[in-house]
Image (cartoon, rainbow, N blue to C red):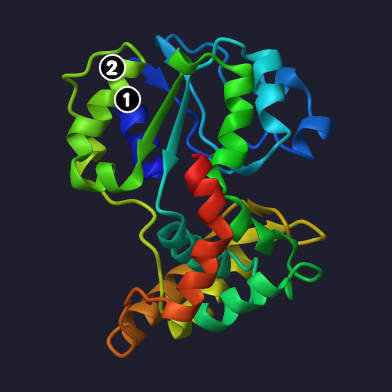
């Protein structure tokens, strides 16, 4: 849903947002970077509002203070989703981008709950951590006025995207009668099929450069050969999709109860 809002805001004539996520305010980027590099992203823009997207900021304790230091009057939009549903989506995204092994969610989530992945797959902990909404939102409320924070729910956006995008436009004080071309899109569709993910992960070697600890990736500059290989992998995925359908998995009752137990206190406080 954050990608959907990003696209609908980018469509609006009064708004400019960079196409990609901006990780500047989280570690290690903040310590290694220069605030002027961040501001250069917006040089010479004449739109009424300038913005950026980074869903990970909701789960990074160091970020709220840093944003407030440089952008004290910024408006913030958070999209929350049922944490159990969010885990399913996040789990398969992390598989796709090579941050965790390609295993069924029943097996893999049990490994994550047990802490089995922490040493070898350092980003695996984020799959659980980013669902503790109260833990991290309260940090933002320590630094920012409530009127500058809009909280939306993924389920509401799916049910009525037009109404919720108008809430966003109203919050930002821009024309709410604008109909975004992206209003009927569904970006970031999740791939749930393990066999197909194994095929799609091959493309990562051609598309991305990874940091030494495999916690970050950066898109490689494309060339015709890489583009050809990528299109070949996508074509092969379409072929095997005739056999392996993309069905969303359902947690067993035992595993679902464990995950709800992890989040229960945070949900009550939220």
Q: Could you say whether the residue bearing mark 2 is in a helix, strand or loop? A: helix
Residue 168 - label: 1
Q: Residue at x 19, y 31 (%)?
A: 163
Q: Residue at x 18, y 41 (%)?
A: 160
- Crowd class of label 1 (few under 14; some 14 to 19; many from 20; radius 10 Å): many
Residue 45 in the image: state x and y as whole percent.
48, 13
Q: How many marks?
A: 2
Q: Are marks 1 and 2 in contact (CB under 8 Å)?
A: yes
Residue 30 in the image: state x and y as whole percent.
77, 31
Tell which of 102 and 208 is nearer to you: 102
Task: Give the Cα distance between marks 1 and 2.
Answer: 5 Å
Q: Residue at x 57, y 23 (%)?
A: 141
Residue 193 placement, left or right of 121: left
Residue 47 in the image: state x and y as whole percent.
40, 12
Residue farthest along the bottom direction in this orientation: 243
Q: Residue at x 34, y 17 (%)?
A: 171
Residue 203 placement, left or right of 166: right
Residue 170 - label: 2
**Residue 4 in which image quadrant:** top left
Residue 62 in the image: state x and y as whole percent.
73, 33
């Amino acid at each position: 849903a954050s990608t959907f809002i990003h696209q609908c805001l980018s469509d609006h004539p009064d708004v400019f947002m960079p196409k990609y996520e901006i990780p500047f305010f989280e570690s290690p980027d903040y310590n290694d970077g220069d605030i002027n590099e961040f501001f250069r992203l917006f040089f010479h823009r004449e739109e009424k509002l300038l913005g950026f997207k980074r869903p990970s900021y909701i789960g990074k304790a160091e970020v709220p203070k840093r944003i407030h230091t440089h952008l004290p009057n910024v408006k913030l939009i958070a999209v929350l989703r049922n944490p159990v549903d969010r885990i399913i989506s996040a789990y398969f995204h992390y598989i796709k981008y090579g941050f965790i092994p390609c295993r069924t969610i029943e097996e893999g989530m049990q490994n994550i709950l047990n802490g089995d992945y922490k040493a070898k797959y350092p980003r695996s902990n984020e799959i659980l951590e980013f669902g503790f909404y109260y833990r991290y939102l309260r940090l933002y409320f320590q630094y920012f006025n409530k009127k500058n924070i809009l909280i939306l729910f993924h389920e509401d956006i799916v049910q009525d995207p037009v109404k919720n995008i108008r809430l966003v436009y109203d919050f930002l004080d821009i024309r709410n009668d604008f109909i975004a071309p992206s209003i009927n899109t569904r970006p970031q569709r999740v791939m749930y099929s393990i066999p197909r993910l194994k095929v799609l992960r091959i493309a990562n070697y051609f598309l991305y450069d990874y940091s030494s600890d495999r916690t970050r990736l950066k898109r490689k500059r494309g060339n015709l050969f890489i583009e050809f290989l990528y299109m070949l992998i996508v074509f092969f995925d379409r072929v095997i999709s005739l056999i392996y359908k993309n069905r969303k998995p359902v947690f067993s009752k035992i595993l679902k109860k464990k995950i709800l137990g992890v989040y229960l206190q945070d949900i009550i406080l939220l």
